[in-house]
Image (cartoon, grey):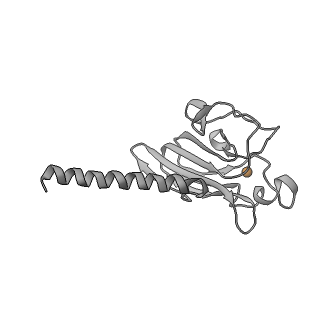
């Protein structure tokens, strides 16, 4: 086989492998919870992937992970929210504390999120951060983190269903709708 023929043959196999891999991803992605977390650094930006799904023991919605570490600098978050669509009439729905004052929901940027679907929030009072997480959506936003320390984050949406009504259960139990971000 000439070198060029060999190259073409290898390229063909690779192309088929890519198509097959993409097909598998497309088929499996909607039901997959995704990685619990991926925190990595690339230049000045670090990445945090959070998932909201249902705890298999309690049945409560739960962020995962709830505590994580980031270096100072720009932090790009992605929240994949598997919870149901939920209207929240009392929603403080303005996006605050993110780079450019926006969050992106399923690819569309918003500075104010419609109350018709806000399942959860991701809020860090120390940074003035308020991000809304609609059910059945992927939210992305970037925060410029300049101070080292350990900062508490909360979900402000009344998503609790346990003892105490809407503010019980996951809202009042550490490790569901609250946690810490440690900046070093
Ligand atoms: Cu919540």
The count of marks equals 0
Image quarter where the N terminus lies is: bottom left
Q: Nearer the viewer, residue 40 or 9?
A: 9
Whether 4 is drawn above or below 96: the answer is below
**Residue 49 seen by the camera:** yes
The residue at the far left in this view is 2
Q: Position of residue 102 (x, y in %)?
A: 60, 33
- Whether residue 102 sits left or right of residue 10 in the image: it is right
- Whether residue 70 sits left or right of residue 120 in the image: it is left
> For residue 182, what is the image quadrant?
bottom right
Q: Position of residue 14 (x, y in %)?
A: 31, 54
- Residue at position x 66%, y 34% from top? 95
**Residue 39 seen by the camera:** no
- Residue at position x 70%, y 34% from top? 113
Q: Position of residue 140 (x, y in %)?
A: 57, 42
Q: Nearer the viewer, residue 26 or 95?
A: 26
Q: Position of residue 61 (x, y in %)?
A: 72, 57
> For residue 114, what is the image quadrant?
top right
The residue at the far bottom in this view is 57
């Amino acid at each position: 086989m000439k070198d060029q023929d060999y190259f073409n043959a290898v390229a063909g196999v690779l192309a088929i492998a890519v198509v097959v891999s993409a097909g598998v991803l497309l088929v499996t992605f909607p039901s997959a919870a995704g990685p619990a977390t991926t925190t990595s650094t690339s230049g000045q930006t670090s990445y945090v992937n959070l998932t909201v799904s249902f705890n298999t023991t309690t049945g409560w919605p739960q962020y995962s992970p709830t505590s994580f570490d980031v270096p100072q600098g720009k932090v790009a978050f992605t929240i994949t929210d598997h919870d149901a669509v939920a209207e929240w009439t009392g929603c403080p729905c303005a996006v605050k504390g993110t780079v450019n004052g926006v969050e992106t929901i399923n690819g569309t940027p918003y500075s104010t999120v419609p109350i018709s679907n806000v399942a959860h929030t991701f809020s860090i009072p120390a940074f003035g951060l308020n991000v809304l997480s609609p059910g059945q959506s992927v939210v992305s936003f970037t925060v410029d983190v300049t101070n080292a320390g350990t900062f508490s984050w909360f979900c402000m949406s009344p998503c609790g269903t346990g003892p105490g009504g809407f503010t019980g259960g996951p809202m009042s139990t550490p490790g569901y709708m609250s946690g810490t971000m440690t900046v070093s």
